[in-house]
Image: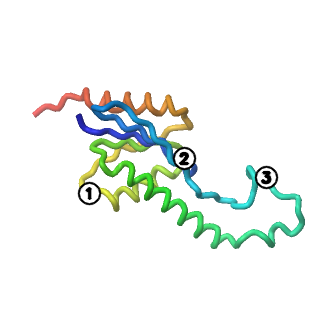
Amino acid sequence: MKTNIGLWIDHRKAVIVLESSAGEELKIILSDADRQPGRIHGERSTASFESLKVEADDVTQRKFTAELHHYYEEVVACVRHAEGLLVFGPGEAKGQLVKELEQAMPKGFVVDVETAEKMTDRQIAAHVRDHFKEANSVITLH
């Protein structure tokens, strides 16, 4: 049996579901990327002159982009051996990951991309199972 991988991703977390003849395996990768470093839970500090302590926007954006790139490289390393790949999730992270995959994977590699809202790990695993069950049940006529 081939290895099918389903991947739910956003900028903070990737949930990878590997389906193979050996069974199902779940792996979680957390991102270190943070749009507003130094803030606790997005709350603004009450200290005066906070704006002087925060880095310039371009520096922050470059750091954020570099951290995302490292995060995507880690995810690509986990899915490199997939024969079937489903990428889904909210926002733009899935599109950015697909661009990374286009550079890292061989030509002709097919990736299914879907938009999905936040899901629990069990919902993600069930969605991946359903997706590949439907894909395997499609009859090809010659």
Mark 3 highlights which residue? 43
Q: Is residue 61 above or below residue 80?
A: below
Residue at the disc numbered 1: 106
Q: Quadrant of the N terminus?
A: top left
Kindly identify which residue carries mark 2: 13
65 horizontally vs 47: left or right: left
The crowd level at tag 1 (other Cα within 10 Å; few <14, some 14-19, many 20+) is: few
Mark 2 vs mark 3: which is more N-terminal? 2
Query: How far apart are the alpha carbons under marks 1 and 2?
Result: 25 Å
C-alpha distance separating marks 2 and 3: 21 Å
Are discs 1 and 2 less than 8 Å apart at CB? Answer: no
* Helix, strand or loop at mark 3: loop
Residue 132 to residue 36: above or below: above
Q: Nearer the viewer, mark 1 or mark 2?
A: 2
| Residue lying at 30% horizontally and 32% vertically, measured from the top left | 22
- Residue that appears at 51% across and 52% down: 92
Q: Position of residue 110 (x, y in %)?
A: 29, 48
Colour scheme of the rendered structure = rainbow
| Quadrant in which residue 105 is drawn | bottom left
Q: Quadrant of the C terminus?
A: top left
Q: Secondary structure at mark 1?
A: loop
Q: Amino acid at mark 1?
A: Pro
- Tell which circle, 1 or 2, labels the residue nearer the N-terminal end: 2
The amino acid pointed to by label 2 is Lys
Tell me which label, 3 or 1, sits earlier in the chain: 3
Query: How many angstroms separate mark 3 from mark 1 (CA)?
Result: 44 Å
Q: Position of residue 56 (x, y in %)?
A: 70, 73
Mark 2, other Cα within 10 Å: few <14 / some 14–19 / many ≥20: some
As drawn, the residue found furthest toward the front would be 22
Q: Residue at x 61, y 67 (%)?
A: 61
